[in-house]
Amino acid sequence: MNHIKKIIFALLLAVALNACSDDQDENQASQPADVLYNKARDAFAEKKYKDAIEAFDEVDRQHPYSEWAPRAQIMAAYAYYESEKYDDAILALDRFVKLHPGHESAAYSYYLTALCYYEQISDVGRDQGMTEQALQALSDVIKRFPDSDYARDARLKLDLVNDHLAGKEMMVGRYYLNRDEYLSAANRFKLVIDKYQTTSHVPEALHRLVETYLKLGVREEAKRYAAVLGHNYPGSVWYRYSYSLLEGKDLTEKPKNGLLGNIF
């Protein structure tokens, strides 16, 4: 009999605890969306990003059809970005765009996605997969929202991304040139001229082609690239060096890598 009483007591206790839990959840869920959102925003302002993300998610969970839900979603993504959790931010932004393609914050969501990739760009000595993704994402912002402030900033960043990718090709080209693999080197330098013609690396790429074709013994081709270099960048140190090479001379002070760093 005592055993049965204990079982009944345990069951009653469990029911009571569940009721308390339900009451707490109901009380929490009964908070207005704007109140929950402001609590999340306060946590964000204090740079408590983990707490802010949880609080913004709570707005979305409790009031999924309210006007505050999209705001909370985009702010949660921004909190991920600020805490440098870029992969989580990209996932959150992708979800936002799929749920709210016509929302007023759509342009910002695409821009923030591009920034997530842009912030992860590595130096030219490493794989440039992330740089390529930044290029695509920035181009997407410009294509979708050409007249927005985000597009204007994306264009500036796109120039830097292209310059970065051109720098990678130049580094590889110099590597081949230094190993006397002249055709492979020439292909890299031509790629810079054809694909990244507005970047700061073009004068050096033209000069390197002069140097490469002279080493190959194709003097006329070297002269052709030197003429292009002289026509477009007459005051460039790279043109002076190319001219010196064609004259069979060697400058005491050779032009440096990029804007003047070590050659090779």
Image (cartoon, rainbow, N blue to C red):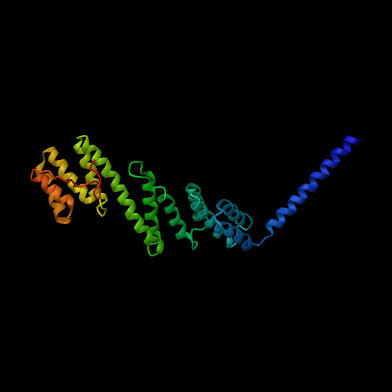
Question: The N terminus is located in which quarter?
Answer: top right
Give the percent coordinates (x, y) of residue 105.
49, 61
| Nearest the eye: 128 or 141 | 128
Q: Quadrant of residue 178?
A: top left
The residue positioned farthest toward the front in the image shown: 252
Coordinates of residue 211 in the picture (x, y in percent): 15, 43
Please state the horizontal and vertical placement of residue 183, each as a whole percent of the image. Answer: 19, 38
Q: Quadrant of the C terminus?
A: top left
Q: Nearer the viewer, residue 218 or 122?
A: 122
User: In this rendering, is residue 144 above or below 123?
Assistant: below
At 37% from the left edge and 58% from the top edge, which residue is drawn?
Answer: 154
Q: In x, y percent, where is residue 104?
A: 49, 63
Q: Residue at horizontal 55%, vertical 57%?
A: 44
Q: Mark yes or no: residue 225 visible.
A: no
Q: Residue furthest left?
A: 247
Q: How many marks?
A: 0
Q: Residue at x 21, y 48 (%)?
A: 204
Q: Is residue 216 left or right of residue 175?
A: left
Residue 183 left/right relative to 132: left
When asked about the image quadrant of residue 46, the answer is bottom right
In the displayed structure image, the side of residue 14 where residue 220 appears, left or right? left
Whether residue 40 is visible to the viewer of this picture, yes or no, is: yes
Q: Residue at x 73, y 53 (%)?
A: 24
